[in-house]
Every structure is written in C-alpha cells, then in structure tokens.
Image: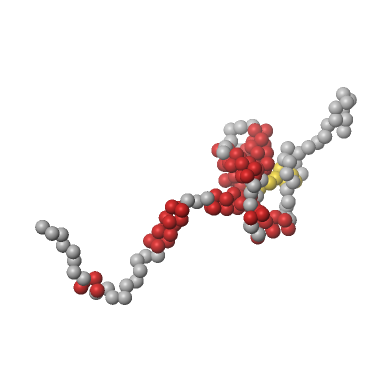
Amino acid sequence: MTSGAGFSRRRTSCFKRPLDFPPGPRILKDVLNNSAEHRLSERELDGVFHALADSTRRAIVVRLCDGPASVSQLAAPFGMSLPAVVQHLQVLQASGLIRSEKIGRVRSCSIDPVTVRRAEDWLGQRRTPGEHRLDRLEDFLASGPPAREDESSEEQLPSKRSAP
C-alpha cells in the first residue's frame, strides 16, 4: 500500500516469530531428542537470560506456565499501559520463551516448553559438585538408617572412656 505522500506502508506484526500451533514435527523432535545439536547457543542463552532479567517478564512467564493467556489478561496485574506490556512480550518472544498467535482480534500467548527445557538443561549441567554431593546426602538421609542384622551387638561393644 502506498499513501498519498509516496510513503510505503506495510502491515507487520509486532511479534516477529511465527507460532507453530499445533506443535509441528520439528518441535516434537526437539522435545524428544534433546541432544547436543538441540542445545541453546550462546546468543540464544543471552537472549533468554536477558528476557528473564526483568521482574515483569518473569511474572509474565510464571503466569504463562499456568496456561495460555491473552495480552490483555497478561497486562491486567501490572500498572502499565498495554503497549508497555506488548514490548515485554516482544522481548520474551524474541528470546524464544513464549509464542503468540492472533485469532481474530485477540492475541494469545503461551510458553514455549522447548526453550524453557533447554535453558533448564544448561543450568543443570553447571551445578556445582557440592550441590551433587548434597543431593546424594539428602537421598541417603531420606532413605533412613540402614537395617542392622544384629541389634544386640551394640550393647556388647566396650564403650570408650576418657582417661582421668
């Protein structure tokens, strides 16, 4: 379309990534085959953590974990304008954390579980060895004391006494 002043106007969506809904074979393959080739690149990780650096965007992600929501539903809890919320959604979508789909006049957003899983995997691989040891200790303590064959053997052992 051209306007009278010679400017070309093109309608573009504020959300740049298309929504694959229902999930296509590529997405299902990514979920099922989480191999090295399906890990997030450094640039993608930067985008994910940049998106999660803002408390409003984290709150939006938490809300979307409960299920899809419209932009107006997502904007309701925040004291900000709808365009401001749309900007947050654009950052989340650019990072791959959420997807959006426009049905009629309503834009609906949902979480992208593939990207969330990949970010979780990246974090999980970088857990410190100390955390792994604590996890093993927790498992050991949760399993209870080991069963003993002869409970009376403890009573027969001489006790250590300190020297006067």
Q: Nearer the viewer, residue 115 or 161?
A: 161
Q: Position of residue 37 (x, y in %)?
A: 66, 54
Q: Position of residue 115 (x, y in %)?
A: 63, 50
Which residue lies most toward the front here?
163
Quadrant position of residue 74: top right
Q: Position of residue 30 (x, y in %)?
A: 67, 56
Residue at the spot 67% in from the left edge and 33% down from the top edge: 83
Residue 155 appears left or right of 54: left
Q: Is residue 60 visible?
A: no
Q: Nearer the viewer, residue 139 or 90?
A: 139
Q: Is residue 16 visible?
A: yes
Quadrant position of residue 23: bottom right
Residue at the spot 82% in from the left edge and 34% down from the top edge: 10
Which residue lies most toward the bottom here?
149
Quadrant position of residue 76: top right
Residue at the spot 42% in from the left edge and 55% down from the top edge: 134
Q: Position of residue 19 (x, y in %)?
A: 73, 48
Q: Quadrant of the C terminus?
A: bottom left
